[in-house]
Image (tube, rainbow, N blue to C red):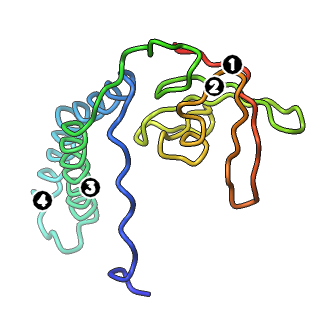
Amino acid sequence: MGIRDRKPRPKSSNYITPDGAKRLRDELEQLWTVERPRVTNEVADAAAQGDRSENAEYIYGKRRLREIDARVRWLGKRIDDLIVVDEIPRDPKKVHFGAWVTVEDEDGTTAEWRIVGADETEHGKGWISVDSPVARALIGKRLGDDVTVIRPAGEMTYTITNVRYA
C-alpha cells in the first residue's frame, strides 16, 4: 500500500479552549520572532565558512528552517480556522466541550477527563479530544447518565458522577 493509497486523515474539529488557542498563538510567536531569526543567523554564519556541501551546521540549519516554516504555515492556517469556546453552557450538569467529566466504570474505578480540542489533547493530564470515541459518547449526556463506549477491546459502560467547568 503506497502513500497515495491511504485514506486521508479525518478532519478534526475546529473547537479549542481559550488556553489552547493562547498556547498555539504563543508557539507561532516564538517560532516567528525568536526561533526562526536565531536559526537564520546560524545558517548565515555556517554559509560564511565556505563549502556548503559538507557543512553539517549549514545542512542541519536549512533543514530546521524548512521545519520551522512548515510549522509556521500550518499554525497560521490552523489558528485562522479555530473556534474558541469560552462560554459555560446554560446547563452545567450536561456534558459539553470544555467540561471536566468524572466517570465510574462497571468495576467501580473512576476516571476524570476534560473534553478539549484535537490540538490540545494530553493523555497524562486526562485531556481527551472532542473527536475521540469517549468524548463523542459523553457529549450531550447529563450527570447520572450511563454511557456506553465502543472500544477496540470491547464495550465499556461508564456512569457520569460529576460534570464541572473550570
* Residue at (36, 43) in percent of width and height: 13
Q: Secondary structure at mark 2?
A: strand
Task: Tell me where residue 108 sits by quadrant.
Answer: top right
Q: Residues within 10 Å of mark 2 (few under 14, many from 20)?
A: many
In percent of width and height, residue 90 lies at 45, 12
- Asked whether, in this view, residue 90 is left or right of residue 92, the answer is left
Alpha carbon distance from label 3 to label 4: 19 Å
Task: Tell me where residue 41 sits by quadrant.
Answer: top left
Alpha carbon distance from label 1 to label 4: 59 Å
Identify residue type, mark 1: Asn
Tag in front: 4 or 2: 2
According to the picture, the residue beneath numbered tag 4 turns out to be 47
Badge 1 vs badge 2, beta-carbon distance below 8 Å = yes
According to the picture, the residue beneath numbered tag 1 turns out to be 162
Disc on the earlier residue, 2 or 3: 3
Q: Secondary structure at mark 4?
A: helix
* Residue at (35, 24) in percent of width and height: 85
Tag in front: 1 or 4: 1
* Residue at (25, 61) in percent of width and height: 63
In percent of width and height, residue 118 lies at 43, 42
Give residue 101's mark: 2
Q: Residues within 10 Å of mark 1 (few under 14, many from 20)?
A: some
According to the picture, the residue beneath numbered tag 3 turns out to be 67
Q: Nearer the viewer, residue 39 or 141?
A: 141
Alpha carbon distance from label 2 to label 3: 37 Å
* Number of numbered discs: 4
Badge 2 vs badge 3, beta-carbon distance below 8 Å = no
